[in-house]
Amino acid sequence: MPFPRTRMRRNRRHDWSRRLTREHTLTADDLIWPFFVHELDGTEAIPSMPGVERLGLGPMVDAVGEAAELGIPAVAIFPVVPAEKKTDGAEESFDPDNLVCRAVRKLKEAVPGIGIVCDVALDPFTSHGQDGLVRDGYVVNDESVAVLIQQAVNQADAGCDVIAPSDMMDGRIGAIRDGLDEAGHHEVSILSYAAKYASAFYGPFRDAVGSAGNLGKGDKRTYQMDPANGDEALREVALDIEEGADMVMVKPGMPYLDIVRAVKERFGVPTYAYQVSGEYAMLKGAAERGWLDWSKVLPESLTCFKRAGADGILTYGAVEVAKALRAG
């Protein structure tokens, strides 16, 4: 019986040969750590996201300091806004002393070497849980963008390095870029959630920031993308790049790796993906039940993002992965 001359297994036989032929490598440089900050002094567990906590400003400084020491380049701040500060008009979003701005100023002083990404969307601040303003039951576009500009400039004034609009209103990237430039923030970058889908994987996040109860039975399908659409994502990304986005993001991550690949191949711009709360909770919950090995499935899942073409990944497991990578 003839044997094959080409044996693909030769390169897989040894650890050293597997390392030499590995096409993609995950490092701490690939990670952005999203975290939740609240008004309380200590920490508070999030039941739907095992291992993730809401952080007070003191614990936040310690946690972000650890992330920086581990080599994580940037963190993303998401606020838990008290119910009494939520309004139909999201006025708290552009208060210069709001929780996000205080967190940014504190981190800039305590951990100056780490990049700070700020989410721009109104859902943490609205009494109805939508990412924009609601008129007659509909989330309006242009009025919402006007508030998003105020929110973005407010965060930049506080010291934010990267503005990350996640709302999916039409035209908001160009409008925010103009607003930032007019306010003198020419060097503040924009990381656009360019292809953000109306996904069912966001549930634990909404629990974490306290918007789930406000949204109730509502949904975001009139402005976030239909999960069935792929070509539309490329149109969205093209528009955001034309409007001035420095970087683009696909959200969620793993269920949309085909979109990550298509975006990277088509545009060649810095492309990010978000391992969202539902993805994280799925893996973590299964690991807690002994069905998966967390120490293996988390880095494997993130390596898949890299293989698809992502230049960076937002993941709630960033600190854990960075520790594991350092330990070797």
Image (cartoon, helix red, strand yellow):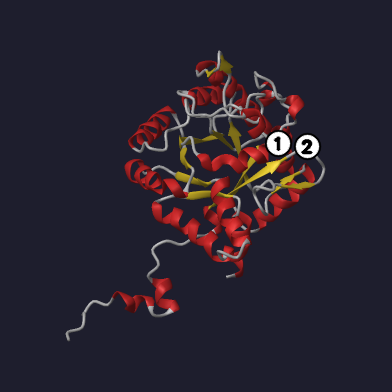
Residue nearest the observer in this picture, 57 or 133: 133
Residue 208, quarter of picture: top right
Q: What's the distance in space between the residues labelled 2 and 1, CA to CA?
A: 8 Å
Mark 2 packing: few (<14 Cα in 10 Å), some, or many (20+)? some
Labelled pair 2, 1 in contact (Cβ < 8 Å): yes
Q: Residue furthest top?
A: 136
Q: Residue furthest bottom?
A: 1
Q: Is residue 320 left or right of residue 196?
A: right
Tell me which corner region of the image, top left, top right, bottom left or bottom right, holds residue 239: top left
Instruction: Name the foreground residue: 46 vs 261.
Output: 46
**Label placed on residue 67:** none
Residue 316 can be seen, yes or no: yes
Q: Is residue 322 visible?
A: no
Q: Amino acid at mark 1?
A: Val
Q: Residue 151 at x, y = what percent?
A: 62, 25
- Asked which secondary structure carries label 1, the reply is loop
Identify the residue position indicated by label 1 in the image: 80
